Image: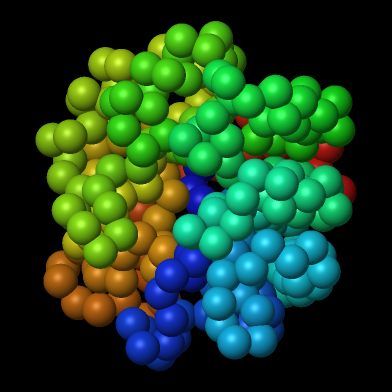
Amino acid sequence: MVIAAPNGARRGKVDHAALPISIAEIATEAALCQQAGAAVLHLHVRDSNGAHSLDAGLYRAATQAITEAAPGMLVQITTEAAGVFGLKAQIACVEAVRPEAVSVAWREFTPEGNPTARRFYDWAASEGIHVQHILYSVEDIARFNAFGMQGQSVLLVLGEYAGAEARADELPAYLEALGDVRDWAVCAFGRAEHAVVNAAMAAGGHARVGFENNLWLADGRLAAGTHELVAQIKNDVLSAADVCALWRLEHG
């Protein structure tokens, strides 16, 4: 499975002129990523000032635009706080949008001591919304396992935005800690993104690549867009129908 993450919550045009901000730009990049092999679009939307947003209307409009530009592509929205949003706003966004899929950071929802977060997980399951749990560290994985989250989907994050870049040799520690999950994918901050996701795929995992985490091709050149990062992946990749089967979705 290849998930394309073309913008994220923090980068802007100053980082790369082709980073998609508007809904039209995101939809155009989604189509290119689909053509390059991505089955899923990891969606962030921006407000009129270009800032990270969890506005349900923007998410619905962007999802519709992606569906028109890239028919069949799965759309996964994010609840990322980005230092701006709290749990109430994150949950309200998902309840209003009712997406097919959503990514949720375990350390932001902290369900161990938070009944509101636990109710959200139960609600999402009842609505048939696929939740991918974002785990940023071995410690996050340990908390996730201790809470009894077997059979779930996870995204392992290596490296940090504007911090330490990911390295492929960090992955074994994550996998050693990982319990029995339905599926796992990796995203990696920095120029080693391609090496890290290749290592993940070789170990049976999936890949999330894109300008949210990295702007550079494996050969050191600046990528023209997230679609070029997707196109570097030469493995046999899952179709959207394959991902729907894996995630138990009835994709419309």
Residue 25 appears in the picture as rendered: no
Q: Is residue 10 above or below residue 185?
A: below
Residue at position x 83%, y 46% from top? 95
Task: Give the camera-side residue of 126 and 67.
Answer: 126
Residue 222 appears in the picture as rendered: yes
Quadrant of the rendered structure where residue 190 is? bottom left
Residue at position x 25%, y 79% from top? 222
Residue at position x 83%, y 37% from top? 250
Task: Point out residue 117 in the picture as x, y percentages from the top left corner.
Answer: 67, 30
Residue at position x 36%, y 53% from top? 233
Task: Give the camera-side residue of 192 and 51.
Answer: 51
Q: Is residue 129 left or right of residue 14?
A: right
Task: Point out residue 38 in the picture as x, y percentages from the top left corner.
Answer: 53, 56
Q: In this view, does 5 lie to the left or right of 156?
A: right
Quadrant of the rendered structure where residue 46 is? bottom right
Q: Is residue 6 left or right of residue 97?
A: left
Task: Give the camera-side residue of 79 and 30.
Answer: 79
Task: Point out residue 78 in the picture as x, y percentages from the top left corner.
Answer: 61, 53
Question: How many circles with numbers are drawn on the protein?
Answer: 0
Task: Point out residue 166 in the picture as x, y percentages from the top left corner.
Answer: 21, 48
Quadrant of the rendered structure where residue 167 is? top left
The image's colour scheme reads: rainbow
Q: Is residue 31 above or below residue 180?
A: below
